[in-house]
Amino acid sequence: MTYARITKLIALILIASIACAGVADAKHKKKKKHKKKPAVVAMAVQAPVVRNWVSSSIATVLATDAFPGVTADTIAPDDALDGPALSAFVSAAFPKGAKKVRQIAAGQPVTMGDVDVAFVSAAGLDATAVRAEELITGAGYVARPGVGYEIVARLLRLRTNLDQADDIKEHAWYEQASRGDAIWSAAQVLKWGGWEKQGAIDTVELLATLPATTGPQHDAVQRAFDFIGMPYIWGGTSEKPQILFGYNTAGGFDCSGFIWRVLALDPTSPKTVATALGGRTTFEMAGKTPAAQRLTAEQMLPGDVILFGRGGVDTPSGSIGHTGMAISPQLFIKSSGQGIALARYDTGYYKDTFAFGKRVLG
């Protein structure tokens, strides 16, 4: 048998083998498909589970029986909020009777600020919100109208940070609120542990200790107060709408983005600040702070950067995970789960995780 004929014969055998394998495989797949057919049919008729960012809050609110006939499928959390719906959610949150709140007529826009005012008022904390604005003004700053309510609402944990994919649904205090925003607030009130109101009152009173400031320090603290009420946005460095990581997002800031915006990006900031900070991220800010320049909690002044880590003062620079800006020996302004908010660093979690401070304004 010639070499050419041998080669041809081998080729034919290979082709036949492949064809047989293909037929066998097809039969095997057909057999498997036939066996699994009932499961496939069952999956086809099963409705997909769709969860909204406010799904658990919807369940909490509907459990009050304040909305007979309304279900999770009909409550429409992504729809624009109107006055009657806001009143209904406030009433659900305070079933034993809320303090009198301003009624907003149907058809009028309802902002996130309106939501916060309604819930803070219903909780009986109007005086605390007004007190916050008076103390800010008394320290020499300009308190924009309503900032006291935003401070108190966040101390009461009435806001939340959404997942990155839902950042477009985040709203600043002056933007139209959704029904979901009011549902979230109502659910938080229903889950209160009893300490929230007194905690807010105590923190607001600490604004009475705000030190007098001038120059760049004063300007930086003023900007920080102006941004209270903006949402937390991962990667955000602007109060204007942004495109981040391929998503259209609302204006807002993550923790280091807030510091970068307030201290480095503002046109009125000293040109040396960006270099002094060390970079845009918390990691860069921490890593470029020599040990000799690290401030203790007792050394903090308004406008100083605070850096936090799980190990407290023993946290390595590479493990620093959060930052904010001091405005007094007890208080700082930060961007986190409550958006831009006032908080204490002299007690609780932030005292335990305080790593060091950093001075970049003179």
Image: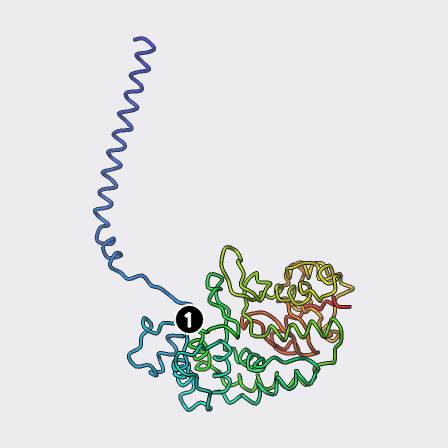
Q: Is residue 249 left or right of residue 93?
A: right
Question: Is residue 98 depicted above or below 7 in this figure?
Answer: below
**Residue sitting at x 24%, y 54%:** 39
Question: Is residue 237 depicted above or below 122 in this figure?
Answer: above
* Residue in the foreground of this view, choosing between 240 and 29: 240
Q: Residue 77's x, y, as percent?
A: 39, 72
Q: Is residue 240 left or right of residue 270?
A: left
Q: Residue 293's x, y, as percent?
A: 77, 65
**Residue sitting at x 31%, y 77%:** 70
Q: Residue 155's x, y, as percent?
A: 56, 79
**Residue sitting at x 40%, y 69%:** 78
Task: Single out the residue that lies furthest toward the front.
Answer: 107
What sort of colour scheme is used for the picture? rainbow
Q: Residue 189's x, y, as percent?
A: 46, 82
Judged from the image, the secondary structure of the residue bearing numbered disc 1 is loop
Question: Is residue 191 depicted above or below 51 in this figure?
Answer: below
Q: How many marks?
A: 1
Q: Quadrant of the C terminus?
A: bottom right
Binning the other alpha carbons within 10 Å of mark 1 as few (below 14), some (14 to 19) or many (20 upward) gives some
Where on the picture, by quarter, is residue 256? bottom right
Q: Quadrant of the N terminus?
A: top left
Could you tell me the amino acid type at mark 1? Val
Task: Single out the residue that lies furthest toward the top.
Answer: 2
Where on the picture, by quarter, is residue 261? bottom right
* Residue in the foreground of this view, choosing between 219 and 65: 219
Residue behind mark 1 = 54
Q: Is residue 29 left or right of residue 62?
A: left
